[in-house]
Image (cartoon, helix red, strand yellow):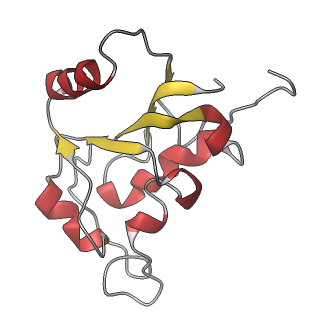
Amino acid sequence: VRDADIVITGSYPKDTEYQQIGTCFAVFGQHKKECIRQDGTVIVMSAASEGVGWHYLFGPGMPLFSPHEDNVPPADIADRDLMIYSDGVSRQDISQFYRGDAPPVYKSWEDILEKLQEKYAGRTPLVAVYPEGSIQIGVLEAGE
Protein backbone atom coordinates (compact mmCIF):
# COMPACT_ATOMS: atom_id res chain seq x y z
CA VAL A 1 0.00 0.00 0.00
CA ARG A 2 1.40 3.38 -1.00
CA ASP A 3 1.23 6.36 1.43
CA ALA A 4 -0.40 4.59 4.36
CA ASP A 5 -0.95 6.69 7.48
CA ILE A 6 -0.60 3.66 9.73
CA VAL A 7 1.40 0.55 8.94
CA ILE A 8 1.07 -2.53 11.12
CA THR A 9 3.64 -5.21 10.44
CA GLY A 10 4.51 -8.38 12.29
CA SER A 11 7.64 -10.44 12.58
CA TYR A 12 5.77 -13.76 12.55
CA PRO A 13 7.02 -16.51 12.17
CA LYS A 14 10.28 -14.97 13.44
CA ASP A 15 8.58 -13.54 16.52
CA THR A 16 9.62 -15.92 19.28
CA GLU A 17 12.28 -13.43 20.42
CA TYR A 18 12.46 -9.65 20.27
CA GLN A 19 15.91 -9.69 18.68
CA GLN A 20 14.29 -10.70 15.35
CA ILE A 21 11.80 -7.81 15.27
CA GLY A 22 13.66 -5.93 12.53
CA THR A 23 12.71 -8.67 10.05
CA CYS A 24 9.15 -7.33 9.94
CA PHE A 25 10.31 -4.59 7.56
CA ALA A 26 11.24 -7.10 4.83
CA VAL A 27 7.80 -6.68 3.24
CA PHE A 28 8.68 -3.13 2.15
CA GLY A 29 11.89 -4.00 0.32
CA GLN A 30 13.33 -0.77 -1.08
CA HIS A 31 9.97 1.06 -0.92
CA LYS A 32 9.76 2.00 2.75
CA LYS A 33 9.40 5.75 2.18
CA GLU A 34 6.70 5.21 -0.43
CA CYS A 35 4.68 2.93 1.85
CA ILE A 36 4.50 5.12 4.97
CA ARG A 37 3.54 8.80 4.91
CA GLN A 38 6.05 11.29 6.32
CA ASP A 39 3.82 11.87 9.38
CA GLY A 40 2.81 8.21 9.58
CA THR A 41 2.90 5.68 12.36
CA VAL A 42 4.60 2.29 12.25
CA ILE A 43 3.41 -0.42 14.60
CA VAL A 44 5.61 -3.50 14.81
CA MET A 45 4.41 -6.68 16.48
CA SER A 46 6.33 -9.49 18.12
CA ALA A 47 5.05 -12.10 20.54
CA ALA A 48 8.59 -12.37 21.96
CA SER A 49 7.42 -15.47 23.81
CA GLU A 50 11.08 -16.26 24.60
CA GLY A 51 11.80 -12.68 25.71
CA VAL A 52 14.54 -10.63 24.09
CA GLY A 53 16.45 -13.67 22.87
CA TRP A 54 20.15 -14.27 22.57
CA HIS A 55 22.49 -14.35 19.59
CA TYR A 56 26.18 -15.11 19.97
CA LEU A 57 27.18 -12.94 17.01
CA PHE A 58 24.52 -10.21 16.71
CA GLY A 59 23.40 -9.85 20.35
CA PRO A 60 24.37 -6.97 22.66
CA GLY A 61 28.04 -7.21 23.60
CA MET A 62 28.81 -9.63 20.77
CA PRO A 63 31.21 -8.99 17.83
CA LEU A 64 28.59 -8.14 15.15
CA PHE A 65 26.11 -6.27 17.36
CA SER A 66 24.44 -3.24 15.83
CA PRO A 67 21.93 -1.28 17.92
CA HIS A 68 18.30 -1.64 16.83
CA GLU A 69 17.91 2.08 16.20
CA ASP A 70 19.77 1.31 12.98
CA ASN A 71 16.96 -0.96 11.80
CA VAL A 72 13.84 -0.59 14.00
CA PRO A 73 12.58 1.33 12.18
CA PRO A 74 15.05 1.33 9.28
CA ALA A 75 17.06 4.55 8.85
CA ASP A 76 15.06 5.78 5.82
CA ILE A 77 11.83 5.88 7.88
CA ALA A 78 13.33 6.62 11.29
CA ASP A 79 11.40 9.90 11.49
CA ARG A 80 8.03 8.10 11.58
CA ASP A 81 6.31 7.41 14.89
CA LEU A 82 7.10 3.90 16.14
CA MET A 83 5.08 1.72 18.49
CA ILE A 84 6.00 -1.81 19.52
CA TYR A 85 3.19 -4.20 20.37
CA SER A 86 4.41 -7.15 22.43
CA ASP A 87 3.35 -8.89 25.58
CA GLY A 88 6.66 -10.77 25.78
CA VAL A 89 8.99 -7.85 26.55
CA SER A 90 8.96 -4.47 28.24
CA ARG A 91 10.67 -1.21 27.31
CA GLN A 92 13.24 -1.93 30.01
CA ASP A 93 13.91 -5.41 28.56
CA ILE A 94 14.68 -4.05 25.09
CA SER A 95 16.73 -1.03 26.24
CA GLN A 96 19.94 -3.07 25.82
CA PHE A 97 19.36 -2.99 22.05
CA TYR A 98 19.40 0.84 21.83
CA ARG A 99 22.04 3.52 22.42
CA GLY A 100 19.42 6.10 23.36
CA ASP A 101 15.88 5.67 24.60
CA ALA A 102 14.09 2.52 23.53
CA PRO A 103 10.78 3.02 21.72
CA PRO A 104 7.54 2.54 23.66
CA VAL A 105 6.30 -1.01 24.13
CA TYR A 106 2.56 -1.59 24.43
CA LYS A 107 1.09 -4.75 25.90
CA SER A 108 -2.49 -3.71 25.21
CA TRP A 109 -4.01 -3.12 21.78
CA GLU A 110 -6.50 -0.76 23.44
CA ASP A 111 -3.62 1.50 24.52
CA ILE A 112 -2.35 1.63 20.94
CA LEU A 113 -5.82 2.43 19.62
CA GLU A 114 -6.16 5.25 22.14
CA LYS A 115 -2.88 6.83 20.95
CA LEU A 116 -3.89 6.44 17.30
CA GLN A 117 -7.32 7.97 17.91
CA GLU A 118 -5.65 10.99 19.50
CA LYS A 119 -3.21 11.41 16.61
CA TYR A 120 -5.72 10.87 13.82
CA ALA A 121 -8.76 12.56 15.41
CA GLY A 122 -11.07 14.06 12.83
CA ARG A 123 -9.90 11.98 9.89
CA THR A 124 -9.94 8.41 8.70
CA PRO A 125 -6.37 7.15 8.29
CA LEU A 126 -5.32 4.71 5.59
CA VAL A 127 -4.12 1.56 7.37
CA ALA A 128 -1.95 -1.19 5.86
CA VAL A 129 -1.56 -4.48 7.72
CA TYR A 130 1.22 -6.99 7.02
CA PRO A 131 0.82 -9.73 9.65
CA GLU A 132 3.78 -11.75 8.39
CA GLY A 133 6.01 -8.88 7.26
CA SER A 134 9.17 -10.90 7.81
CA ILE A 135 8.22 -13.37 5.07
CA GLN A 136 5.97 -11.28 2.85
CA ILE A 137 7.16 -9.70 -0.39
CA GLY A 138 5.56 -6.38 -1.17
CA VAL A 139 5.21 -5.05 -4.69
CA LEU A 140 4.53 -1.44 -5.69
CA GLU A 141 3.45 -1.09 -9.27
CA ALA A 142 4.84 1.87 -11.19
CA GLY A 143 2.47 4.84 -10.99
CA GLU A 144 0.38 3.26 -8.25
Q: Is residue 102 above or below residue 32?
A: below
Q: Position of residue 138 (x, y in %)?
A: 69, 33
- State which quadrant residue 35 falls in: top right
Q: Is residue 46 visible?
A: no
User: Between 31 and 40, which is closer to the camera in this rendering?
Assistant: 40
Q: At 38% across and 81% down in the image, what residue appears? A: 56
From this view, report whether residue 134 is shown above or below residue 119.
below
Left or right relative to 102: residue 42:
right
Find the residue positioned furthest to the front: 122
Closest to the observer: 57 or 128?
A: 128
Q: Residue at x 44, y 90 (%)?
A: 63
121 or 62: which is nearer to us?
Answer: 121
Write down the quadrant of residue 65 in the picture.
bottom left
- Left or right, residue 65 beside residue 18: right
Q: Point out the image quarter for the C terminus.
A: top right
Q: Residue at x 37, y 43 (%)?
A: 81
- Image quadrant for the N terminus? top right
Percent x, y for residue 115?
22, 28
Where is 122 relative to 81, above or below? above
Indicate the quadrant where residue 107 lies. top left
